[in-house]
Image: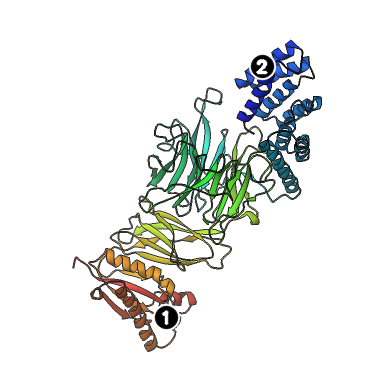
Amino acid sequence: MNRLIYSILFFFIISGSLYAQQYSTKSKKAIENLEKGRQYYQLYKYEEAVAYLSKAIEIDPDFSEAYFGLAQVYTDMKEYKNAAGVYEKGMAIDPDFYPAGYFYMGKVEMKTGDYESAKKSFQKFLDINKGSKFIRREAENGIVDCKFAIKAIQHPVPFSPKNLGANVNSNYDAYWPSLSADEQTLVFTVLLPVDTSRKAVFGNRQEDFYISHRTDSTDGWTEAENMGKPLNTANNEGAQAISADGQMMVFTACNRRDGQGNCDLYLSHLEGDHWSVPVNMGRPVNTAAKETQPSISPDKKEIYFSSNRPGGRGGLDLWKTSLQPTGSWGKPVNLGDTINTPGNEQSPFIHPDNQTLYFSSDTHVGMGGFDLYVTRKDSSGRWQTPINLGYPINTWNDEIGLIVNARGDKAYFSSDREKGKGKDLYEFELYKEARPEMVSYVKGIVFDTYDRKRLEANFELIDLESGETVNQSKSNPLTGEFIVSLPVNKNYALNVSKTGYLFYSDNFSLKGIHEIANPFVKNIPLKRIKVGEKAILRNIFFATDSYALKPESKVELNKLVDFLKNNPGIKIEIGGHTDSIGTETYNQILSENRAKSVRNYLVDHSIDPERLTYKGYGYSQPVNTNATASGRAQNRRTEFRIIATDEN
C-alpha cells in the first residue's frame, strides 16, 4: 500500500469527521493535537506527527481517529509492528467506526511476517460485509497470499546469500547489478550524496554507475570504480542493463531535457575503451509515461522494460521492443496477461538462454509486497504461468531486481539485510528448479594474421538445424575482444566476417551437454583477401562415405555464396580433403566428388562457374594426425583458396 493511498485515507478520516463536526471525542485538546499531527504528516515530519497523535490518544484513550491516523504514520515510517498494534487498539474500541481498519491491519501484519494474524484480520473485514468490491477482492487476495506464505515458510527453498565484499559494496547503497556472460564484468548503480558535508537525504542524492571486474584474489572482485563521463552526470542515471558481451548498455534517466516523459530509456555502446554519449531511445519506446528497468536479450535484438504507459493491464507492466531491420527500435509489445496484472510488474531480467524471464510483482500470489518470479517460454514461444521463487528468497519485504549468471547456477541481488549498512550486493546459489537453461559462451580476440592488428568484425551465431541466426554482434574495435553466448542442447555455426578478409567459420556442438565447466576460448585469425590464402569451411557436412551434402551445410554454403557475390572480382578453388581411412584411390575420388558437390551448389545459386574450380586432395594434405579420432575429424574438411582477384 503506497503513501498516496494512506495519505488519502488519513485525510478522509480526519477531514470527514472535521467537516461533519462528528469526532468520536468531546475533548478539544485531543482534537487540537490530532489536527497538528495531520499537518506534520502532510509535511513528511513523521516524528512530530507521532508525538501529537500519541498525545491525542493520551488525552482521550477512546479517540478512534487518532489511532487510525497514528497507524498510518507508523506505516509510512515502515514501523509495521507499531502500526499493527495501534490498528488493533483502534479496532477494539469500536469495530464499526472504521470497518476497513481490519483490512489495513491485515496489510501491515503481512509486512511483519505475521501471516496467521493477517489472514484473520482479512477474514474479519470480509465477515463485516462492508466496503467496496475492490477492497473486498483485495482482502480475498490477501487471504490467498497468507495461505501461500504460511506454506512457503514451512517449506523453504535453499538460500544462502553471500555479500560481494568491500571492493564492491561501500557505505552507500548499491543495487541493480548487471553481469556479462563470462561473469568477468559487474556493473551496478550506487546512490551517492551530492554534498558529503550534508546529510544524505532526499535532494542530496544522485545515482551513478560503478564497474568491477572479477579477480582471482580472495576478495573476488576488483575495487569498484565510478564509470565516469559520459555515462555518469550530475543527475540521476540508474537501473541499467549491459548486454551479454558487455558492449551495449541501456539505462534509465528521469526528467532530462531531451526526455519524452517522466523516466526514459537511454542507449550507449562501448567504443574501444570508452562508452558513447548516451542517446535517448526516443519514440515509440519512450513516451510521456515512465519507462524504466531495462533488460537486453542475448542477441541484442530485444529490450524488455517496465512501464506504466497506456495500453497496459494495470500500473507498471512489462513490455518488449524489438530491433527492426532499419536499425530502429519498434513499437513495444505488452508481455500479456500471463505476466502482467492489474497491479505492478517490474525489474525484468531476460536470461542469456533467451527463454527464461525473472521479474517482480506485487499482485501475483506471494508473500506480500513485491516478490520475485520466474517464467519460461513454452514450445510455441508463449510465456508460462509465473512461479514464485519461494521463501526465504521472497519475504514480507519488497524483493525487486534479481539477475542470474549465464551458467544458471548463481543469482545476484541487492538487499539491506545487514542492518545499518544500507543496501549491498549479494550472490547466492540458485536452487535447481528455479534455474534457466545453462548457457556457455565463446570468447576471444579477432586479429589480422598478417600484422596481428586487432580487428572489429561481424559475428553471427546460427542454429545449424533451423538455419536461424540466434545472435549477431561485433568485436570491440580497439581490443578485438568478443563474447558470444551459446545456449546448450543445440549445434551452432559461428561465422566471423570483415570487408576485405576471408570469412572464418567454426562450429560448436552442445547437444546433450548439461554441465560445462569451461567455456570456449578461441582467438580468431582473419586472412586478407589475396591470392593463395585459404579458409576452412568447418560447417560443411557429408554423410559417412558419401558426397551428398547434409541439410545443415546450407548455412555455410549460403555464407560462401554471399561472400562471392560481395567480392565479384575473385576466383576460388574448392578443395576436398579426407582422413587416411581407406585406400588412396577411394579417398581421392571421395574428396573430389565432395568438392564438386560444393561447386555445384554455388553454381545452382547464381555463382558464375567461370569463377570456380574444384579439386580432390584425398589424404595428401593432413592438418593433424590421423592416429586419433579428433585428428582425423580435422583432416576431413572442405576448403576454398583464392586463385585470382581483381588485382592480378
Task: Specify how the rendered protein is coloured.
Answer: rainbow
Q: Position of residue 74 (x, y in %)?
A: 69, 26
The CA distance from mark 2 to mark 1 is: 97 Å
Residue drawn at (70%, 38%) of the image: 136
| Quadrant of image for the N terminus | top right
Say the numbered circle drawn on residue 2: none
Residue closest to the eye, 556 or 478: 556
Residue drawn at (63%, 21%) of the image: 41
Q: Position of residue 177 (x, y in %)?
A: 54, 43
Quadrant of residue 399 within the rendered picture = top right
Q: Is residue 378 left or right of residue 551?
A: right
Quadrant of residue 582 within the rendered picture = bottom left
- Which residue matches tag 2? 19
Q: Is residue 368 left or right of residue 548?
A: right
Q: Look at the numbered discs 2 and 1 and tell me whether their residues touch, using CB distance below 8 Å.
A: no
Residue closest to the eye, 32 or 519: 32
Q: Position of residue 280 (x, y in %)?
A: 40, 39
Element carrying mark 2: helix
Element carrying mark 1: loop
Q: Position of residue 398 (x, y in %)?
A: 64, 39
Type of residue at label 2?
Tyr
Residue closest to the eye, 98 or 415: 98
Say the numbered circle drawn on residue 579: 1
How busy is the neighbourhood of tag 1: few (under 14 within 10 Å), some, or many (20 plus)? many
In this rendering, does residue 453 appear at all?
yes
Indicate which label's residue lies in the foreground, 2 or 1. Answer: 2
In this rendering, does residue 167 appear at all?
no
Classify 520 as above or below 390. Answer: below
Task: Find the residue positioned furthest to the top.
Answer: 28
